Amino acid sequence: MNGLRAVIVCLMLACTAVVAPTAAATPDSAAPPTWSALPVPAAAPPVYVLDLAARGAGEAWATGYEQTAEGQRPLLYRWDGAAWSRDTTFPGAGEPGYLNKVQIVGKEVRIFHNRSGEGEILRRSATGTWSTLPLPQTLWTYQDFAAVPGAAWVVGEDETGLKVLRHDGSGWTEQSVPPGVRYVMGVTARTATDAWAWADTDTGSTVLRWDGTAWRDAQVPLPANGNIHTILLEPSGRVTLGGSQYVDGAPRTYLMTWNGHAWRTTYPALGDTYTEDMVRGPDGALWLPVRSDRAFQSKYARVDGRRVTFTYGPERTNAIDVRPSALTRAGSALLSFGTVEIYGSKPNLMSERLGG
């Protein structure tokens, strides 16, 4: 009996020796991902980043402009899954202007281009060929752009006032909006018959919705004394709206979520944060860049329900302002694109990645 007990004890010790290293490695393997810096080819500083969008882990596009001695020049950068490169093959790349909103539409990339004051939509095919879709008229301001299969919208203003232009695949039409709408701040779309816009009216901010027939008031119960920064539409049907509400003269960030039945409003601990660059991350939480309390590092907020946590980008030597201006999901990673100002120099480009 003593011999059997000795055999059992030896077996238990052997099992412990085999299992222990694996158990000890678990905390390291479960460590959360961290932000890493990605090199970006330099432009003529100062530079300005306006948008970022990705098709997946292997393709992303960032837009903006550089300020040259001759004036603004458009900037376009492409991420191929391994590195950023500058693209100068699009029509008007060497002319005055800027590139703004990027939209991934099927196999195409569509970008709003202000080309020497004239508005047009750049279209890049799956084979890499560029073409242009001019707007039917010149506007004083080009406020926003959205595109989906079968439709595109451009909102802005001319000398006669507000303009909402829609392309249906064959031509442009000018659309009317409900009475009292003075200015459309932004537009986004899920399909050709489901688009959303946020606007200023005679009585404050409002949300409009295109149902394939007309723009109507979406009847969103916005917080009093609030404005709207962005509307995030998701394939599931969920809608997330971000903005600021003024309470006792000070702004605070709010989020509203539509689950298909009702709106839910929360006030996450974000202070006065502009939510325009909010995205749904691969982990299911909302992510957005926020004002950093460290001059040499960027800062990002993760919002999961009412819980808010923060992460920092990598430390940058001699940086006095690290500012991610746009954020997007790229497969299982998050990509940011923005500017970094090193002591003694003007802002130039930076990019960071989380995960992937």
Image (tube, rainbow, N blue to C red):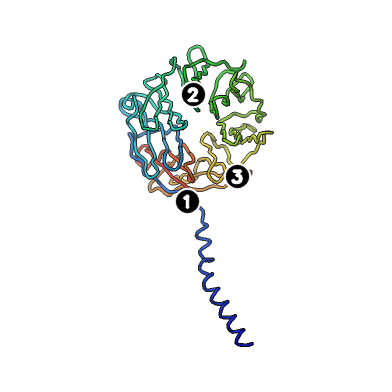
Q: Nearer the viewer, residue 163 or 61?
A: 61
Task: Indicate left or right for 92 with 257 as reference.
Answer: left
**Few, some or many C-alpha atoms within 10 Å of disc 1 (few <14, some 14-19, many ≥20)?**
few
**Few, some or many C-alpha atoms within 10 Å of disc 2 (few <14, some 14-19, many ≥20)?**
some
* Residue depicted at 45% across the width and 17% down the height: 140
Q: Amino acid at mark 3?
A: Asp
Please provide percent x and percent y for residue 66. Answer: 36, 31
Q: Secondary structure at mark 3?
A: strand
Q: Secondary structure at mark 1?
A: loop
Residue 111 visible, this orientation: yes
- What residue does disc 3 label? 304
Please provide percent x and percent y for residue 69. Answer: 30, 27
Q: Are the two marked residues, 2 and 1, in contact with CB atoms closer than 8 angstroms?
A: no
Please provide percent x and percent y for residue 54. Answer: 45, 37
Q: Amino acid at mark 2?
A: Gln
Task: Indicate left or right for 213 with 289 as reference.
Answer: right
- Choose the circle earlier in sequence order: 2 or 1: 1
**Few, some or many C-alpha atoms within 10 Å of disc 3 (few <14, some 14-19, many ≥20)?**
some
Q: Quadrant of the N terminus?
A: bottom right
- What residue does disc 1 label? 34
